[in-house]
Image: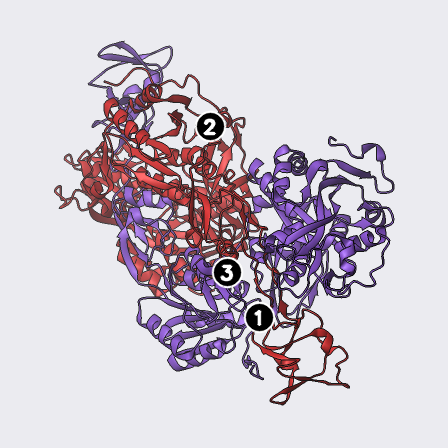
Chain colours: A red, B purple
Amino acid sequence: MARFKRTIYLHMKTLEEARAVWKEAVGECRTAVERIPTDEALGRVTAEPVTARLSVPHYHGAAMDGFAVKASDTFGASDVRPLRLEVGRRAFPVDTGDPMPEGTDAVVMIEHAEKVDDSTIEIRQAAFPWQHVRKVGEDIVAGELLLPQQHRLRPADLGAMLAAGVPDVPVYSLPRVWIQPTGTELVPAREAARAQPGQIVEFNGTVIASLVRENGGVPMLQDVVPDDYESLLDAVRRAAACPAHVIVLNAGSSAGSEDYTVSLLKELGTLLVHGVAMMPGKPVLLGLIGSKPFIGLPGYPVSAIMAFEQFVRPLLHWMQGLPDPADPTVEAVLGRKMPSKLGLEEFVRVILGRVQGRLVAMPLQRGAGVITSLTRADALLRIPQDVEGINEGEPVRVRLLRSEDALEHTLIMIGSHDNTVDVLASELKSRDARLHLSSSNVGSLGGLLAVRRGQAHFAGSHLLDPETGQYNRRYVERYLKGTPVRLVRLTRRRQGFLVAPGNPKKIRGIEDLFRDDVRFVNRQAGSGTRILLDYELERAGRTPDGIIGYDWEEYTHMAVAVNVLSGTADCGMAIYAAAKALGLDFIPVCEECYDLIIPEACWDDPKIRLLLEVIRSDRFRQRVEALGGYDPSESGTVAGVWDGTTWRESRVVSRES
Amino acid sequence: MARFKRTIYLHMKTLEEARAVWKEAVGECRTAVERIPTDEALGRVTAEPVTARLSVPHYHGAAMDGFAVKASDTFGASDVRPLRLEVGRRAFPVDTGDPMPEGTDAVVMIEHAEKVDDSTIEIRQAAFPWQHVRKVGEDIVAGELLLPQQHRLRPADLGAMLAAGVPDVPVYSLPRVWIQPTGTELVPAREAARAQPGQIVEFNGTVIASLVRENGGVPMLQDVVPDDYESLLDAVRRAAACPAHVIVLNAGSSAGSEDYTVSLLKELGTLLVHGVAMMPGKPVLLGLIGSKPFIGLPGYPVSAIMAFEQFVRPLLHWMQGLPDPADPTVEAVLGRKMPSKLGLEEFVRVILGRVQGRLVAMPLQRGAGVITSLTRADALLRIPQDVEGINEGEPVRVRLLRSEDALEHTLIMIGSHDNTVDVLASELKSRDARLHLSSSNVGSLGGLLAVRRGQAHFAGSHLLDPETGQYNRRYVERYLKGTPVRLVRLTRRRQGFLVAPGNPKKIRGIEDLFRDDVRFVNRQAGSGTRILLDYELERAGRTPDGIIGYDWEEYTHMAVAVNVLSGTADCGMAIYAAAKALGLDFIPVCEECYDLIIPEACWDDPKIRLLLEVIRSDRFRQRVEALGGYDPSESGTVAGVWDGTTWRESRVVSRES
């Protein structure tokens, strides 16, 4: 029986308040100082200023191969009055690094010394004092500050310390983080394939451990404990007693786990913050167990990562005496209106690329459970809590998740998704490792609109015009007036009926949908697949009357497939990939065209040229063919050249251009 | 006997040529592909595209706590027409993550369900289909591309793979780099204190190993081998036979080592490049031993690091299928004219900070042996080979060695150096870990000129006016007309005579310099210390006549100290720190003032406020006192307020303001 009351965030804090409370409580926490060998100190943070014990160089040495001389002996030497010096008495052969013989203060380079005989050289230019000599302390003087405290050591720093006679260095210990995943419903990742409905694959532990590692900490990842109070209490007691510096509990998503955590914080320590007005990440808990910082991270992966970034990451920096981490940001133009709840700080994952000169940020899915919204994101957009939303076209400052340079090599694709786009991404990357394809899946029409607004390098679309049986052209005419584009066929793909393995109901085509023993599951009105089904019905001279389940609408290919797999439907229409993903049988019904719509303004972009090269390659077609369900024979042909007003048919169906 | 001919770079290449040759020869080298557990793959690079094996979620699940219902059952529910549902028949209690009971397609949140009795709930709002339901494949669909090949794995990537049933992942092996230091003159770093003149402390090996580690490689650091052909040949043969992917030889600086390397490359493999027109880093050697890339790095540490960056670093990226590393750059204004040799690509280490709104880059020392030019640098300025130099004030693009954010927290100090500035830097950092003091030591006058040109947040100066006995004021009047500044006393410091330990010649003051048995060593004319000595002589009513060695000029405090230590002089004048560094005795002669000159335009900068707070703190004065040789009793007093035309004396010697 579900509880009738939810955990109430009585004292929910704004993100700013929560961060202030946290900094006040644990901002001065430092790990112990340890002295380690200098040559093992890369990336560690100095706990004290480092001063030189020796001078570098520690002797006056020759900086060139040649002859050490006393500069004043050479005054007056010139081309017209060459000067001879006796080797061994007034000129001493030296190699780079040799100590300067007593009484000498300059080196004449070997190129500038002419050999007269074995014991005499001649020079034609005076040496000035200390010429080509590395003097004592020229680099480092004993006693001087080499490096400040709270400094993260880089390779050259280690070199300077070793040179200056500093064989070991006091640094902060690496912060150790106890990571405790909890949840009765969790199954280990290695058993993912056996997970039952209601069971969730445990992977947050690995993600959190990796985040700890990235931020200079040492993760102590524990086995999952079930979501009951005694188990949690026992786990946190062990964490408190062990040498970990920080305790992270990753709450189960089941009811009660949050309440348990609140209770145990109250029992064993201090509760500082319960709930933060941020999204994702709201259910975060902050507290102290004794003097150890404690963080309860939410169960949804994106929430857990966002809360980690706000609270655990700075803590790991503070513990080593480092300032708050600062992340690079850039200014971009928002590609789609983003409403946002007042009073909630929102972190939106966006893709980001330079399209026609402007950096465009296009929001990805918002769900806190959608981890691919992070793996696919190029940047994070933070919508402050006092903002109700941001309009399309407004400038926004986003935090980069990739390097700024990488943005220049990012292709932005918006529209309908198809698995061949994955192949495209992979082939592009293997031709130019810098190239990255970022895509936002908002459906075919959304892609056309993005092209119209100059927000994408290209769109992916498969819109059938039932009147002509043609793909995309009618929609280009309607939505891209004044925007010249070219249609490039990416592939033809098969749509068909998904049926249980072995096709127990022996479904063979459209006619079978009208049988009494066949329950159909449909796609929602307006979807490309629904348009296609209705088109095929019409071509067969039929109306939908008599199809059981025609009114039962699902919103994705996969949802259709799942209904067939679970047996709630006998048949549904979808692409081959959905059948393949769930191991269903596939009965081809028809083929549709999936085209790329490339704005004329991007046509000469070298990234687009490479894209076309890839699409037209044999390798691409072979890989697409191997996916099953595709016919790439027309891949790369230009299916239409639209000048903004009319089609220029001459260019149609050319594989070159 | 020195050779009379230097190694000749018969085929020396430009940096661009050398990089092209290198990329052509080794750009396609890849390490072997290995399959490793996903949870250990952080930071590794995928060798193949990764596709999902399972869909995520793998079942339709509740996304909220509440009641699972069939949406169509709820249509019509409203405030005026509440709807009752029987629990267990038309409404099923679910917690977040629970699988959706068969026939249900929406979740009513617990907050929106009113309990009527134990078996009935009432709702006042219709549910729409799939409301608060996480559908199968909403995040990931089995078979779709999760990550492209040649992708460096981040924490969220590992999570996505584990969730999608990918327990292991094919990645490129980490490139192993054999690092062979060579040089007969090298002593291990742990024996640095015992190094004799002519011996050089080995630390390049550690620096190179750290650079390898930073770039994702595994260093195999070897013991030093002497600079003879047989030893080198043997070492390289062993490297070629072992599982290392790359061989790096760090040449000794002694004569011949470079020739040896050329010969052994010709004997065992292929010589590709001998010498590159870059500085530092010219004597780099590139080749192949069998199919293994071989790099001979120069002996000077800065040269070795620069050559590493140009040739080893990209190689380590290529070997894992990654593109060339791209480093963040910013545009700055060059603070000092930099002449540069035509035909030579020069890398100048600069300090960098934002002064009065402009990013200013100020060059540090150029010597390839000066490793502190790298540890102290904020950025690198690359002067192309076809440029003869860059004028002061010209815009330049520099490569950041610190984060862009860090620049906003950098204080730029230009002028004379003093050890108390080190204390200042350290105290600033302990008050605000973000704060960084970058200093360029160009002498007192250089500091004044930098302030005039708006290139420094403040200058350090100790210029005595012999006519008035005052410090700095006369020079401000002369050089800072129209530039309002304030003089803030940093400290008084003692100058005195350096003598051998135990003061064997019993030197007590100025009068002793005139003794026949005392050999003096002087500082160069124009230096602050020389002005000070002459001033003291005048005050004592003496002329320099009769001081043995008065004409013997050295250019630094340390050079004076070294002459005293080695016994070539009995006495010299310098600051206490120089005596302390070399363990000499110190006889105080007089005190001088070391002031900070702070432009009025920077006076209200929060960084300068903090600087003043530090200077005026007891802790700073205690630390300065502990150095010895300083009198910080006036530290922080304002010794003058200059409005660009006149002194406003009212403000003088105030510790506040």
Q: Earlier in the sequence, mark 1 or mark 3?
A: 1
What is the x, y in percent for residue A66? Answer: 61, 78
Image check: A420 left or right of B187?
left
Mark 1, residue position: A99
- Please report, as a chain letter, where disc 3 is located: A
Image check: A83 left or right of B205?
right
Q: Of tags 2 and 1, which is closer to the observer? A: 1
Quarter of the image where the N terminus of chain A is located:
top left
Mark 2, residue position: A22
Query: Neighbour class for label 1 at 10 Å: few (<14), some, many (≥20)?
Result: many
What is the x, y in percent for residue B124? Answer: 35, 14
Q: Nearer the viewer, residue B94 or A339?
A: B94
Could you confirm whether marks 2 and 1 are on the same chain?
yes
- Please report, as a chain letter, where disc 2 is located: A
Query: Neighbour class for label 3 at 10 Å: few (<14), some, many (≥20)?
Result: few
Residue lying at 42% horizontally and 38% vertically, measured from the top left:
A32
Q: CA distance from mark 2 to mark 1?
A: 58 Å
Helix, strand or loop for disc 2 = helix
Image check: A482 left or right of B230?
right
What is the x, y in percent for residue A58? Answer: 56, 62
Mark 3, residue position: A606
Image height of A396 relative to B524, above or below: above
Q: Nearer the viewer, residue B101 or B551?
A: B551
Helix, strand or loop for disc 3 = helix
Q: Is residue A465 visible?
A: no
What is the x, y in percent for residue A516? Answer: 15, 34
Q: Is residue B271 visible?
A: yes
Q: CA distance from mark 1 to mark 3?
A: 57 Å
Image height of B57 relative to B475, above or below: above
Based on the displayed image, in which of its 4 quarters is residue A614 positioned? bottom left
